[in-house]
């Protein structure tokens, strides 16, 4: 499959996923009834599709009064409805989600958390049923991005702040997400600037 064909296929899947979101009715989300529609309180979506064709979408949602991460999984063309869940509802602001599919069918999620004036980078994995596991935290990290290589390696890039002080210097880092999740001693590659 060519890159162009792959891109067109991903756009078709994403369009199908968004069309199904609009049709989901009367969902129960953490005890509150909702319409299943993405309203003005939802933004910053990230999308990934695993090898089984399961579409995962994660977004920032403020329906609970704070910036939380909600997630949805669905199989386009399937009779099964979308599974929607409040994924990360820890105190503080959960923003900037990045998402990548793993070869084993799970998804890797990275996001930024801000609370008590400190910014943290989180990395975790979740299944198609939206169960979160293997969470790791990187102090003073923000603005994550994820990419899955052909061999299944998930790479994480982020901005590492020297401190949480506004205006402090920063550097861009790249590391295997697995290293952070398992506590391996992989040293992140620091992107050099001239």
Image (cartoon, helix red, strand yellow):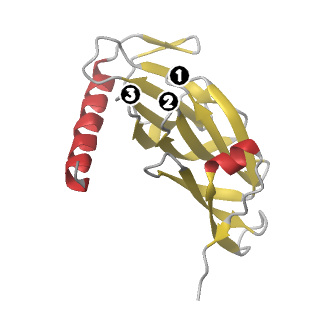
Given residues 122 and 67, the one toward you in this image is 122
Residue 63 relative to residue 135: left or right: left
Which class describes the residues within 10 Å of circle 1: few (<14), some (14-19), or many (20+)? some
Which class describes the residues within 10 Å of circle 3: few (<14), some (14-19), or many (20+)? some
Where 189 falls versus 1 (above or below)? below
Residue 26 relative to residue 146: left or right: left
Given residues 137 and 142, the one toward you in this image is 137
Check disc 2 and report the residue beneath it.
71
Check disc 3 and report the residue beneath it.
54
Residue 82 lies, in percent from the top left, at 39, 19
Task: Report how far apart the C-alphas of labels 3 and 2 lie in the structure.
Answer: 13 Å
Dot placed on the residue nearer the N-terminal end, 1 or 2: 2
Task: Give the image quarter of residue 35.
Answer: top left
Q: Tell me the tag on residue 128.
A: none
The C terminus is located in which quarter? bottom right
Which class describes the residues within 10 Å of circle 2: few (<14), some (14-19), or many (20+)? many
Check disc 1 and report the residue beneath it.
85
Task: Report how far apart the C-alphas of labels 1 and 2 lie in the structure.
Answer: 6 Å
SS label for mark 3: loop
Residue 189 relative to residue 8: left or right: right
Where 183 falls versus 193 (above or below)? above
Q: Residue furthest bottom?
A: 194
Are the residues at dot 1 and dot 3 in contact (C-beta closer than 8 Å)?
no
Residue 159 lies, in percent from the top left, at 63, 64
Are the residues at dot 1 and dot 2 in contact (C-beta closer than 8 Å)?
yes
Residue 190 lies, in percent from the top left, at 65, 72
Are the residues at dot 3 and dot 2 in contact (C-beta closer than 8 Å)?
no
Q: Residue at x 21, y 46 (%)?
A: 8
């Amino acid at each position: 499959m060519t890159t162009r064909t792959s891109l067109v296929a991903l756009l078709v899947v994403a369009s199908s996923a968004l069309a199904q979101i609009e049709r989901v009715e009367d969902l129960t989300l953490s005890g509150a009834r909702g319409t299943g529609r993405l309203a003005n309180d939802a933004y910053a979506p990230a999308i990934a599709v695993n090898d089984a064709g399961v579409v995962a979408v994660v977004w920032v949602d403020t329906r609970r009064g704070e910036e939380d991460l909600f997630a949805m999984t669905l199989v386009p063309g399937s009779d099964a409805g979308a599974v929607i869940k409040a994924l990360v509802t820890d105190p503080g602001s959960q923003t900037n989600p990045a998402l990548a599919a793993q070869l084993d069918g799970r998804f890797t999620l990275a996001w930024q958390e801000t609370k008590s004036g400190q910014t943290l980078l989180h990395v975790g994995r979740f299944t198609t049923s939206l169960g979160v596991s293997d969470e790791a935290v990187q102090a003073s990290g923000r603005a994550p991005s994820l990419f899955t290589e052909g061999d299944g390696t998930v790479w994480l890039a982020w901005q590492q702040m020297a401190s949480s002080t506004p205006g402090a210097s920063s550097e861009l880092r790249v590391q295997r997400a697995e290293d952070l999740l398992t506590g391996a001693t992989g040293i992140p590659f620091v992107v050099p600037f001239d």
